[in-house]
Image: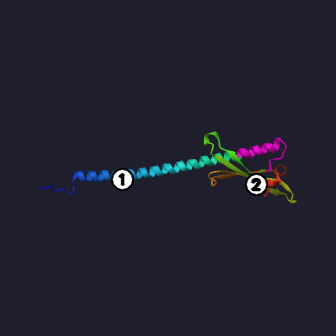
């Protein structure tokens, strides 16, 4: 003889409650895992940007120091390569490119130049940063001008 299941059986309600709790917990863990993944991606982007800005500023400061303290003639190269830092491995390379535009006074004479240095990672060229500075026109090689 079969035993009838009552609609208000305590075991059935506990089973349904346990299954629903497991589903809610699993869904919550999925969202938490996704948010951790997005945070990690954002952290990597910030780290890459910080590294690019540091390289660009240091190179611009080196060129500026060369213009200030040495012979005031800067190298005519418009682009070059940085090697990666020690912690990045030997495959990390960065490319730099420099351009300049003349700034003119009221008499249409060039008095300064706006120098734009762009640094990008070799493997991922979409990661790029540009820094700008205004220098005396005497420092800027003609090869840099647009």
Name the image quarter holding the N terminus: bottom left
Give the side of residue 125 with respect to residue 67, left or right: left
Number of marks present in the image shown: 2
Position above or below: 130 against 66: below
Mark 2–mark 1 contact, CB under 8 Å?
no
Element assignment for label 1: helix
Q: Position of residue 3 (x, y in %)?
A: 15, 55
Q: Position of residue 123 (x, y in %)?
A: 62, 51
Q: Pick whichever, 102 or 96, lies toward us.
A: 96
Question: Residue, x 57% and y 48% (percent of image)?
Answer: 44
Give the side of residue 100 with respect to residue 124, left or right: right
Q: How far apart are the two marked residues, 2 and 1, measured between alpha carbons? A: 58 Å
Position above or below: 107 against 37: below
Q: Position of residue 99 (x, y in %)?
A: 76, 54
Callout 2: few (<14), some (14-19), or many (20+) C-alpha neighbours within 10 Å?
some
Residue 75 among magenta residues = yes
Q: What secondary structure is the magenta-colored segment mainly?
A: helix
Q: Position of residue 77 (x, y in %)?
A: 77, 50
| Boundaries of the magenta span | 57-76
Q: Residue furthest left?
A: 1
Element assignment for label 2: strand
Q: Pick whichever, 11 or 142, lies toward us.
A: 142
Residue 66 among magenta residues = yes
Q: Which residue is mark 2?
A: 99
Callout 1: few (<14), some (14-19), or many (20+) C-alpha neighbours within 10 Å?
few
Name the image quarter holding the C terminus: bottom right
Question: Residue, x 47% and y 51% (percent of image)?
Answer: 34
Q: Which mark is residue 65?
A: none
Q: Which residue is mark 1?
A: 23
Earlier along the polypeptide chain: callout 2 or callout 1? 1
Question: Residue, x 26% and y 53% (percent of image)?
Answer: 13
């Amino acid at each position: 003889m079969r035993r009838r299941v009552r609609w208000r059986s305590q075991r059935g309600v506990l089973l349904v409650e346990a299954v629903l709790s497991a589903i809610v917990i699993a869904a919550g863990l999925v969202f938490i895992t996704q948010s951790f993944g997005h945070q990690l991606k954002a952290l990597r982007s910030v780290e890459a940007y910080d590294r690019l800005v540091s390289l660009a500023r240091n190179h611009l400061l080196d060129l500026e120091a060369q213009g200030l303290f040495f012979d005031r003639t800067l190298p005519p190269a418009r682009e070059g390569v940085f090697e990666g830092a020690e912690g990045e491995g030997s495959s990390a390379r960065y490319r730099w490119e420099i351009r300049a535009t003349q700034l003119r006074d009221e008499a249409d004479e060039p008095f300064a130049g706006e120098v734009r240095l762009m640094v990008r990672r070799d493997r991922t060229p979409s990661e790029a940063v540009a820094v700008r500075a205004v220098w005396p026109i005497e420092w800027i090689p003609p090869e840099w001008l647009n």
